[in-house]
Amino acid sequence: MSDDEDFFRQSMADVQPIKQPKRVNLKAEKASNPGLEHRKKAAVEEMPSHQGDPLSDECIEPLDPLEIIGYQRPGVQHGVYKNLRLGKYQIEARLDLHHKTVEQARRSVYQFIKDCIEHDIRCALITHGKGEGRKDSGLIKSAVAHWLPQIDAVLAFHSAQKHHGGAGATYVMLKKSDKKRQENMERFSKR
């Protein structure tokens, strides 16, 4: 060994490795806000009450039963949205809202999206039906189109292709879970 290497080893003999957290926080730390922290915790732990809940059945604009619905959150690539619209992604989970009231559907959609995120599901299908020939035609469909943009985990959605239910079903693209995001960062950083 050279003198430089010996000197380096002697200098570093008492150095301890820094313990790194298992998760990488990509967002900048903000000043502590107890009210905000309480609201975040309450939102994660349980579904908010019906009043003030973004998944309420109030102010839902009625849609035509055959209308094609779609939504793309800013930042979602056009190609990703196009593939979703064309049904090119594998459907990893399904939710059927037939024969449910609006309140039951609201709870089901909220819990379904929450479960999808917990299980690292990226593409799901919600079958809501068209509601043709009913007094309130397209009520559940209108409600789903109203609720989905208000859920942060939903990146995009679009009416399904005919073989998956057409205007009576909706493809939903969800955000990656923190776990999957971390795995991708680790995988791509090794390259």
Image (tube, helix red, strand yellow):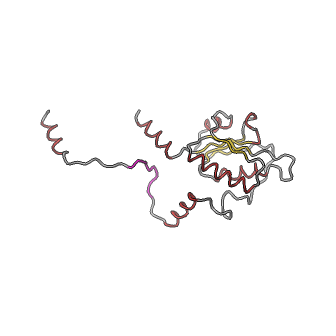
Which quarter of the image is occupied by the C terminus?
A: top left
Name the residue at 68% across, 56% down.
Answer: 55
Looking at this view, is 148 or 127 the one in front?
127
**Above or below for 179 versus 47:** above
In terms of image quadrants, where is residue 85?
Answer: top right
In terms of image quadrants, where is residue 61?
Answer: bottom right
- Give the overall secondary structure of the magenta segment: loop
Which quarter of the image is occupied by the N terminus?
A: top left
- Measuring from the top left, give residue 136's x and y in whole percent: 83, 53
- Measuring from the top left, give residue 175's x and y in whole percent: 57, 45
- Measuring from the top left, give residue 36's x and y in whole percent: 52, 63
Could you tell me how many numbered marks the image carries? 0
Q: Residue furthest bottom?
A: 35
Q: Quick check: 6 left or right of 83?
A: left
Q: Is residue 88 magenta?
A: no
Q: Is residue 25 magenta?
A: yes
State which region is magenta. Answer: 21-29
**Above or below for 134 versus 124:** below
In terms of image quadrants, where is residue 13?
Answer: top left
Q: Residue furthest left?
A: 3
Name the residue at 56% across, 57% down.
Answer: 44
- Measuring from the top left, give residue 64's x and y in whole percent: 81, 47
Looking at this view, is 46 or 151 the one in front?
46
